[in-house]
Image (cartoon, helix red, strand yellow):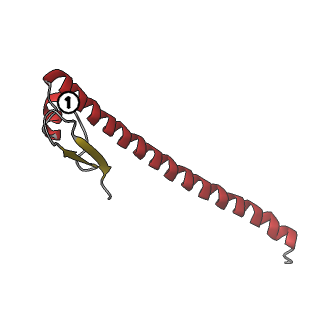
Amino acid sequence: MKITARKVLSYAVPCVLLAAMLIWFVISVKSADASRSERELTALKNSVENSITMCYAFEGAYPESVEYLVSNYGLIFDNDKYIIHYDVFAPNLRPTVVVLERQT
């Protein structure tokens, strides 16, 4: 049985195209996952900031902790996935808030 260059190419080209499509698919899925994660982090930051503003508008002072926002203003987040660093200087000064995603 004689193997010709044409026969090799007829098998090689589809295999190379399939491999390229699989690589493209994996990269696309990873990119979509990173984008989703970034949107979730931004949404949580906005929720924390909105809760702080709402508390100040209703009570005339900024909340003393994230736990206060959770119990009184309905802030919900996954403690296992996110870290919220909440630094209060005084009740009449807006606290500094940093929201980070935990590394797994």
Classify mark 1: helix, strand or loop: loop
Q: Residue at x 32, y 39 (%)?
A: 45
Q: Residues within 10 Å of mark 1 (few under 14, many from 20)?
A: few
Image coordinates of residue 91 in percent, x first then y, are: 13, 35
Q: Nearer the viewer, residue 37 or 85?
A: 85
Image coordinates of residue 15 in percent, x first then y, are: 70, 63
The quadrant where residue 17 appears: bottom right
In the rendered view, tell whether residue 93 sits above or below residue 38. above
Q: Nearer the viewer, residue 101 or 2?
A: 101
Q: Amino acid at mark 1?
A: Gly
In the rendered view, tell whether residue 61 sits above or below residue 78. above
In the rendered view, tell whether residue 9 sits above or below residue 42. below
User: Which residue bears the numbered disc 1?
Assistant: 74
The quadrant where residue 2 appears: bottom right
- Residue at the bottom extreme? 1
The quadrant where residue 8 appears: bottom right
Quarter that holds the N terminus: bottom right
Q: Residue at x 60, y 58 (%)?
A: 23
Q: Nearer the viewer, residue 43 or 63?
A: 63
Q: Nearer the viewer, residue 4 or 79?
A: 79
In the rendered view, tell whether residue 7 sits above or below residue 71. below
- Residue at the top extreme? 58
Q: Residue at x 18, y 28 (%)?
A: 73
11 to the left or right of 85: right
